[in-house]
Image (cartoon, rainbow, N blue to C red):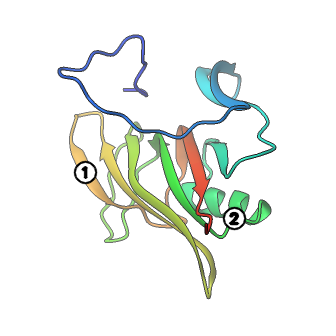
Amino acid sequence: MGHVLPFDSVVSQPVAVKGHGSMTAIFDSVPDPETNFTLFSVKGRGEEGNGILLRVRPNEDVATAIEEVCRTHGIESARVYGIGSINEPVFEDGRRIVCLATEIAIENGSLEKTPEGLRTSLDAAVVDTDGVLYHGRLARRDNPVGVTFELVIVENRES
């Protein structure tokens, strides 16, 4: 279990990778006294650009944390990318994965302004400690972070 470590990972065949980055901020692995793990934390500042690097801490709901930080920064539409862990993830269709140690990758994440306010949609792949893989849309307000969740939020800007 745990996020993929680039220097310890081997892929079976060549892959093409696209990503988003920042010239002034990074995710750096540092000891975290709250969890007793070495975790990725945001370092640096981004004064320019159209994105946010965000680490969501334990017991915070992932979707509402995204909505709150975007509201604070005036972002009303965005793509959301990330990996992390959630305690007993719940999908919108009611399925619950009864496992505290899950790993989650957002496969398709977005934030949009609706008449009810900002709403995050997170389609995710979830793996439990037995290696069982699940797919679905995470339910809002019902997915507390386990240890950590690292996110890249890229604002959709009209050209």
The image position of residue 112, as x and y in percent, is: 56, 72
Q: Up-down: is 41 above or below 113?
A: above
Q: SS class of the residue under badge 1? A: strand
Residue 52, relative to residue 113: is it above or below?
Answer: above
Amino acid identity at mark 2: Ile
Q: Do the residues labelled 1 and 2 touch (CB within 8 Å)?
A: no
Q: In the rendered image, is residue 158 in sight?
A: yes
Q: Considering only order in the chain, which callout, 2 or 1, is on the residue closer to the N terminus?
A: 2
Q: Distance from label 1 to label 2 (Cα)?
A: 30 Å
SS type, badge 2: loop
**Residue identifier under label 1:** 134
Q: Residue at x 62, y 88 (%)?
A: 115
Residue at the (60%, 27%) spot, across then down = 40
On the rendered structure, is 5 left or right of 54?
Answer: left
Mark 2 Cα-neighbour bin, 10 Å: few <14, some 14–19, many ≥20: many
- The residue mark sitting in front, 1 or 2, is 2
Work out which quarter of the rendered image holds the N terminus and state it: top left
Instruction: Pinpoint residue 78: horizontal percent, then vertical percent.
Output: 57, 62
State how many labels appear: 2
Identified by mark 1, the residue type is: Tyr
The residue that mark 2 highlights is 75
Tell which residue pokes out farthest to the front in this image. Answer: 159
User: Could you tell me which quadrant the C terminus lies in?
Assistant: bottom right
Is residue 42 in view from this perspective? no
Residue 101 percent location from the top left of the image: 40, 36
Q: Which of 14 and 5 is in front in this view?
A: 14
Q: Is residue 36 left or right of residue 144?
A: right
Q: Which residue is drawn at 27% across and 55% down?
A: 135
Q: Which residue is drawn at 35% across and 43% down?
A: 99
Of residues 101 and 15, the one nearer the viewer is 15
Outermost residue, bottom side:
115
